[in-house]
Amino acid sequence: MDNYNGYNEKSHYNDDPEPNSFVRAFDAFPKSKPQYVTRTSGGGKWTVVMAVVSCILVWTELARWWRGSETHTFAVEKHVGRSMQINLDIVVKMKCKDLHVNVQDAAGDRILAASRLKEDPTTWAQWVDAKGVHRLGRDSQGRAITGAGWHDEEGFGEEHVHDIVAMGHKKARWGKTPRLWGSEPDSCRIYGSLDLNKVQGDFHITARGHGYAEAGHHLDHGAFNFSHVISELSFGQYYPSLVNPLDRTINLAEAHFYKFQYFMSVVPTVYSVHQGSGPAPASRTVFTNQYAVTEQSKEINERMVPGLFFKYDIEPIMLQVEERRDGILTFAIKVINILSGVVVACHWGFTLSEWVREVIGKRRRTQSEGVIGAKSDYDE
């Protein structure tokens, strides 16, 4: 009798594949029938724990993969070059016609930088507010914002190497000088790039008729004001995304005869990003320069030359900053391993917790039966 009291034994134990389903006969993953599966509160709790732990570990692995592993290596500079590019964007609180911009290097060459750079008349209030804070910011591409409105973004000085390399390959453009809107210009914006000899040198901005013998071009001392804003000062190819030590620097002159001196040690730097594994991973590289700077600013007497003096020296070493990141396939395998480990660990945790609950419950039932169901001498 196949059916006894509504129970069909054949249908309950029959695990044979259904007709016309040849592939199911090779299924190596057995399944439990729904009537054999029981949902418990303990299993639900461990499932929540498994989901939370999995999310935390996967997010941590994703962050680690995104950062990559970064290494810094110093080596002797082997690339011998004769020229080096300097990029600057400086606002001086003097009129453009009253300024001289020149470069004097150790080779004895004097470069009239003013003929190669752009000079735009502007107003000091457009760049610095009443508190002496730089008013102009940078956009998402790292370019100086010189249009309407003011922003506080500073580019990404603390970002990772892959961000620097990605931004470094974008086209660089100088921001436009803000319109005067009828205001009388009292400052001068000097900006652009120029090629210099790759030797020790001195880039300086002085007043007309001071520092160089020029007949009939002596500027009145009362017009001296070398307060300045440095929005960009870098060496090598111009990368607006890179934040340098002197970027967004403001210095105010306390007297007419005031001398600002910046001493810079320039170190050639190579940023590299290697993606994937194997003998020939995909890589991208950006060649640039970094520098360390110290400042000495003081009031001087009328026998000395006031102005801005940027003294730079090229170091004979090169810094290599490399970032390595696993490929997508390697990252996916690591994520799968993490999820598999979490599933196995939570399964063991669930099994042990259920066993402990069962042992504790059995002891409690035994103690209860021993008190209530025990026989005594009065029952006889």
Image (cartoon, rainbow, N blue to C red):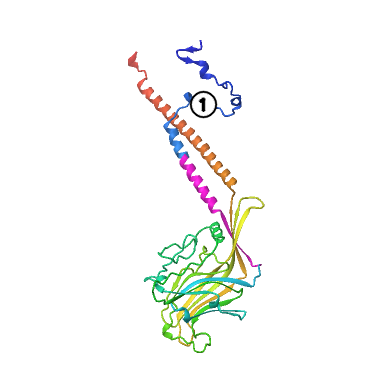
Q: Residue furthest top?
A: 1
Q: Is residue 93 rendered magenta in the image?
A: no
Looking at the picture, tell me which residue is in the foreground, 89 or 281.
89
Q: Residues within 10 Å of mark 1 (few under 14, many from 20)?
A: few
How far across and how far down the image is residue 339, in percent?
53, 40
Quadrant of residue 362 within the rendered picture: top left
Q: Give the labeled residue for mark 1.
A: 32
Q: Residue at x 64, y 52 (%)?
A: 281
Q: Residue at x 49, y 89 (%)?
A: 216
SS category of the residue bearing label 1 = loop
How far across and how far down the image is residue 174, in percent?
51, 67
Tell me: residue 99, above or below residue 336: below
Amino acid at pointer 1: Ser
Q: Residue at x 45, y 14 (%)?
A: 6
Is 12 on the left-hand or right-hand side of 23?
left
Tell me: residue 244, above or below residue 367: below
For the record, the magenta segment spans 51-78
User: How many numbered callouts?
Assistant: 1
